[in-house]
Image: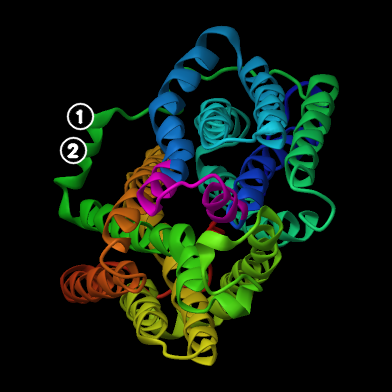
Amino acid sequence: MTAKAPNGAGRSPLLFIFLTVFIDLLGFGIVIPLLPVYSKAYGASELMLGLLFAAFSGMQLLFAPVWGRLSDRIGRKPILVGGLFGTSLSYVLFAYSNSFELLMLSRLLAGFFGANISTAQAYIADVTTPENRAKGMGLIGAAFGLGFTLGPGIGGELTHISASAPGWFAAGFSCAAAIFGWINLPEPEHKPGVTRIFGFGQVVRAIGEPRIGVLFVLSYTFIFAFSSFEAMFTRFGLARFPSVFNVPANLESATMEDVLAAAPIAGRYLMGIGIISALIQGGLIRRLVPRYGETKLAVAGPLLLGLGFLVVGLATTWTWVIVGCLIMPLGFGLNNPALTSLVSRASPEREQGSFLGLNQSVSSFARMTGPPFAGLVFAYGPEVPFLIGAGLLGCSCLLARWYHGRFGATFPKKAQVPATGV
């Protein structure tokens, strides 16, 4: 990627942007296997757990435009570095949390300070040419994927040390990145008009344009379903297969130590799903796109993910749950980069960065709404969130099939797709 680094700073600005987003998503990934078990220890219902997951993405969605506009006024560096220091403080609070209320506060603060991804996108727009902007945004996608993949495994294994160790690790990592940026990150020369922060009205108008609006609907549905799985997978396992997670069959009699024993197991499964998805996105997808094209892969993605959900939801043994967990990353690995590439190619030539950023906002909204819905329907049975998710993904598959028939010919097959996150 050709980038114009300010003040002769070489590659360090883009490296810092990568680290900023990577650390935001690493911290998010670290707590994924922990929130279900920590909140269970504090007596939280599945709906409360869903709201706990939604808090982070909801704050990001609300405050990303605020941080973006503020960075236009006072500069990109203060927002990026300050956000990392604030994120570090939120994980210190997470480490000290001994109640559901403190857990919720820590997630709200993490989302508030981590809502600087729009500023990271603006920074990339400042230091790249229009021709290379989509590649720069792909760097953010790669950081998303890597942070989300490694986070659950790290968070789960750190519970062997103590319940607070994952929080301290995330806090220290964020603080170290903030110090690195404070010392090394140059303030770019701001280019007015290079990037835009989309509001709700712009989102509605964009969705009204079928060629790109349908892609946002597909992205929303896909992330809505997958975030429901993230939030409820551990609770599903605890309810249906408690022995696999080393907890008593009667969860109400489980001690804090019993519940914590589930975190490493959940983290390993979630990290495994992320690794398989990353391998597909980083390797196999580049062979499949030239042969089939992105629109066909956007059909196959939700079909496979929905099949994985169906297998997990109907599983009578843990072996079938593993089978479903092996199918799901195939769907995610095919769908996510294909949709990101389609959004990039359907966007106006000089506004690709803005529309890719808008696609991330749609994903944040899906992550905000999916877990609470899953927690609400969990009351009707641990398998219900996955079965409903399978149904939604089936509808998404049909919509993607229509999109392929309507617009597929306008997207000639090509060999490269932008990097993207999970």
The answer to whether 272 is drawn above or below residue 219 in the figure is below
Q: Could you tell me which residue is drawn at 25 percent across and 37 percent down? A: 203
Determine which quarter of the picture holds residue 356: top left
Q: Residue 74, image x and y in percent?
A: 58, 8
Side (left or right) of 22 relative to 318: right
Which element is circle 2 on?
A: helix
Q: Residue 56, image x and y in percent?
A: 49, 37
Marks 1 and 2 close (CB-CB < 8 Å): yes
Please state the total of marks drawn on the protein image: 2
The answer to whether 225 is drawn above or below residue 237 in the figure is above
Q: Could you tell me which residue is drawn at 24 percent across and 71 percent down? A: 400
Gap between marks 1 and 2 measured at Cα? 5 Å
Side (left or right) of 374 relative to 194: left
Span highlighted in magenta in the image: 34-51
Q: Is residue 329 magenta?
A: no
Q: Residue 377, image x and y in percent?
A: 27, 60
Q: Which colour scheme is used?
A: rainbow
Residue 70: which numbered mark, if any?
A: none
Q: Could you tell me which residue is drawn at 45 percent across and 69 percent down? A: 236
Residue type pointed to by label 2: Val
Residue at the outermost front position: 253
Residue type pointed to by label 1: Gly
Q: Could you tell me which residue is drawn at 46 percent across and 57 percent down? A: 231
Residue position for label 1: 201
* Residue closest to the eye, 161 or 207: 161
Which element is circle 1 on?
A: helix
Q: Residue 281, image x and y in percent?
A: 57, 70
* Residue closest to the eye, 390 or 203: 390
Secondary structure predominantly adopted by residues drawn in magenta: helix
Residue position for label 2: 204
Q: Is residue 41 magenta?
A: yes
